[in-house]
Amino acid sequence: METVKIGILGLGTVGGGTVNVLQRNADDISRRVGCNIQVVAAAVRDLSGDRICPTDGIDLTDKPQDIINRADVDIVVELIGGDSLAKELVLAAIANGKHVVTANKALIAKYGNEIFAAADKKGVCVAYEAAIAGGIPIVKAMREGLTANKVAWLAGIINGTGNFILTEMRDKGRDFADVLAEAQALGYAEADPEFDVEGIDAAHKLTILASLAFGMPLSFDKCYTEGITKITQQDVTYAEELGYRIKHLGLAVRGESGIELRVHPTLIPEKRLIANVDGVMNAVLVKADAVGPTLYYGPGAGAEPTASAVIADVVDIARTLDGNVEHRVPALAFKTESITEQTVLTSADFETAYYLRLTTEDRPGVMADVTKILADQAISIEAIIQKEPNEDQDATIIMLTHRVIESNMEKAIAELKSQPFLKGDVTRIRVEHLNA
Ligand code: HSE
């Protein structure tokens, strides 16, 4: 095949970046793939809108169906986002026998099982490297590079906007809302920034990583999800005093009784490499049995980093167009017939350590009561700090606990909240040592 023709749905930040990189690096790319890659058509929302890329030689349309119905398009690249129209278009493209490349994590996390089944039936590929951690080739690493391994757990900073906010809060003491506005202006944040700050975007990505790691169906609805909106400057500072950084992590852990699938703010020892991943950068730490720990780091968002992953998928598909479809890499790393349901634990069964912060009356016996309530739930304290009382004579107590089953911690927190000495809420943030 001399030229592989692609049609792009959406010519915004990532679509425009994809066209720019394909044009700029056309020679190197065609030397690698053995043919030319040509963007023949693109669907846009507004035909007269501004573009970040040249559009000469590309047929523009405001009807996305035109792209998937074109006989000359080999690969449809879906970059419109969202999960309703995108799902409809991707399934229609598959039905038309087109291969699909997508950067849409919500689409894959929620409907990937159905989409991959449709693609298998039709004998086409659906590739999604750009859906997770932007430019980091994490899907390729997990699906191919780590194929010999049994994965024990993985932990990822997989939302650049959230990481940018936490980094700026820590380094510059900046306000949450102010940093979020900057992330939006830089084009990192989702159209609905709640997806970033409430952890939904990270949960989409973690869902996919867990399936790649453990050979289970995509289980987005079972992922425990907590955002960063309750993290205060105080907690960031106290975590530092204790030698930790707060990061918004996605964790997929294979335990004896099931899989923990969870996204939440997490204290990590500051000496861990992943604790030093700052700003909009992403990183995924994978603990596997043969290789041990491996860490994948890079830009998790942005036009060209994401385009880099989109084009890698286009090239992978282009390389198989003349080949034996039986030898394609399976969409979720495991052969479809070997993907097995696994127990995904509810949060009550998670096992993790905790950071607790509470404000109490400053009088004799309070500390003894607090530690007894924890001891009654078999919670062992690893470190404890009591801050000088404030002008109202309230004391702040900060504790780190050893690992505990979450339902025990829930009971202890409920008991603490019922005490007359407690002022306000009990802040709890999970702690992971990520000992690899
Ligand atoms: N909003 C996402 C992020 C974009 O901040 O990481 C990349 O998926």
Image (tube, rainbow, N blue to C red):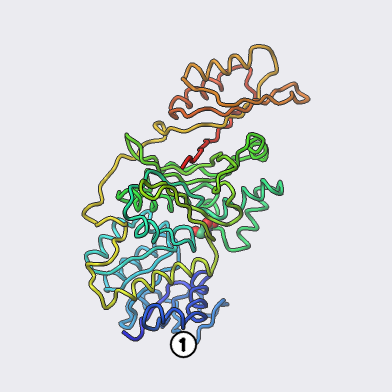
At 65% from the left and 48% from the top, the residue drawn is 176
Q: Position of residue 325 (x, y in %)?
A: 24, 70
Secondary-structure class at tag 1: loop
Question: In screen coordinates, is 5 left or right of 184?
Answer: left
At 74% from the left and 23% from the top, the residue drawn is 389
Q: Residue furthest top?
A: 364
The reply to whether residue 164 is in sight is yes
The reply to whether residue 192 is in sight is no
Of the 4 image quadrants, the one containing the N terminus is bottom left
Other residues around mark 1 within 10 Å, as few (<14) / some (14–19) / many (≥20):
few
Q: Please name whichever residue, 69 or 174, is drawn nearer the observer in this view of the structure.
A: 174
- Within 8 Å of ligand 1, the CB of disc 1? no
At 31% from the left and 57% from the top, the residue drawn is 333
Question: In screen coordinates, is 166 left or right of 101?
Answer: right
- Residue 191, placed above or below residue 416: below
- Residue 363, placed above or below residue 36: above
Q: Position of residue 118 (x, y in %)?
A: 26, 63
Q: Position of residue 92 (x, y in %)?
A: 30, 69
At 53% from the left and 61% from the top, the residue drawn is 301
Residue 89 figure quarter: bottom left
Q: Residue furthest right?
A: 391
Question: In screen coordinates, is 178 left or right of 156?
Answer: right
Q: Please name whichever residue, 70 or 154, is drawn nearer the observer in this view of the structure.
A: 154
Q: Position of residue 140 (x, y in %)?
A: 39, 61
List the residue tagged with mark 1.
57
Q: Amino acid at mark 1?
A: Gly
How many marks do you count on the picture?
A: 1
